[in-house]
C-alpha cells in the first residue's frame, strides 16, 4: 500500500526532537520505505491490541517504533515515536 500523505501530531513532533541524530537518520530511511509500501517486510508493520487496538506500529530498529493510524485511503497519522514503551 503506497502512502500519499503523512500527518504528524504535536506529540510525535515533541518525541522526534528528543531522538538522537542516529535514530533520526534511521527513522527517515524507514519512513521512505513506509511511504512506498506500508507493509514492507523490514518495517514489521502490525496492528496493535488492547487499548491500542485502533493503532498500528512499525519498527525503526530493535528499540524504536512509530505509532500510527491509517486515515482515509493513502493517508496516515503518525501519533508517536519512541521505544516499545509508547505502545504499552
Image: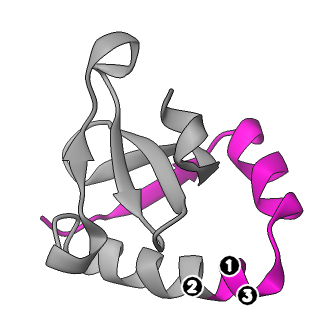
Q: Does dot 3 land on a helix, a strand or a loop?
A: helix
Mark 1 → mark 2, Cα distance in angstroms: 5 Å
Residues at marks 1 and 2 touching, judged by CB atoms closer than 8 Å:
yes
The total number of labels drawn is 3
Q: Which residues are magenta?
A: 1-25
Mark 3 → mark 1, Cα distance in angstroms: 4 Å
Residue at the (33%, 73%) spot, across then down? 35
Query: Is 24 rendered above or below residue 1?
Result: below
Mark 3 → mark 2, Cα distance in angstroms: 7 Å
Residue at the (26%, 22%) spot, across then down? 49
* Label 1 sits on residue: 23
Label disc, if present, on residue 73 of the rendered structure: none
* Label 3 sits on residue: 22
Local crowd size for mark 2, using a 10 Å CA cut-off: few (<14), some (14–19), many (≥20): few
Q: Position of residue 84 (x, y in %)?
A: 52, 46
Residue at the (30%, 13%) spot, across then down? 50
Query: Is 1 rendered above or below residue 88?
Result: below
* Label 2 sits on residue: 26
Residue at the (58%, 37%) spot, across then down? 86
Between residue 52 and residue 2, name the one nearer to us: 52
Tell whether 30 sits left or right of 42.
right
Q: Is residue 66 magenta?
A: no
Tell whether 26 sits left or right of 77.
right
Q: Does dot 1 land on a helix, a strand or a loop?
A: helix
Between residue 86 and residue 32, name the one nearer to us: 86
Tell whether 17 sits left or right of 61.
right
Q: Position of residue 78 (x, y in %)?
A: 52, 47
Image quadrant in which the N terminus is located: bottom left
Between residue 47 and residue 68, name the one nearer to us: 47
Amino acid at each position: 500500500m503506497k502512502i500519499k500523505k503523512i500527518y504528524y501530531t504535536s506529540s510525535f513532533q515533541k518525541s522526534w526532537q528528543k531522538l538522537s541524530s542516529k535514530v533520526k537518520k534511521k527513522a527517515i530511511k524507514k519512513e521512505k520505505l513506509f511511504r512506498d509500501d506500508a507493509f514492507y517486510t523490514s518495517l514489521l508493520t502490525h496492528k496493535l491490541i488492547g487499548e491500542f487496538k485502533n493503532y498500528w506500529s512499525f519498527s525503526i530498529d530493535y528499540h524504536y517504533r512509530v505509532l500510527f493510524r491509517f486515515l482515509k485511503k493513502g493517508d496516515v497519522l503518525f501519533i508517536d515515536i519512541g521505544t516499545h514503551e509508547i505502545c504499552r
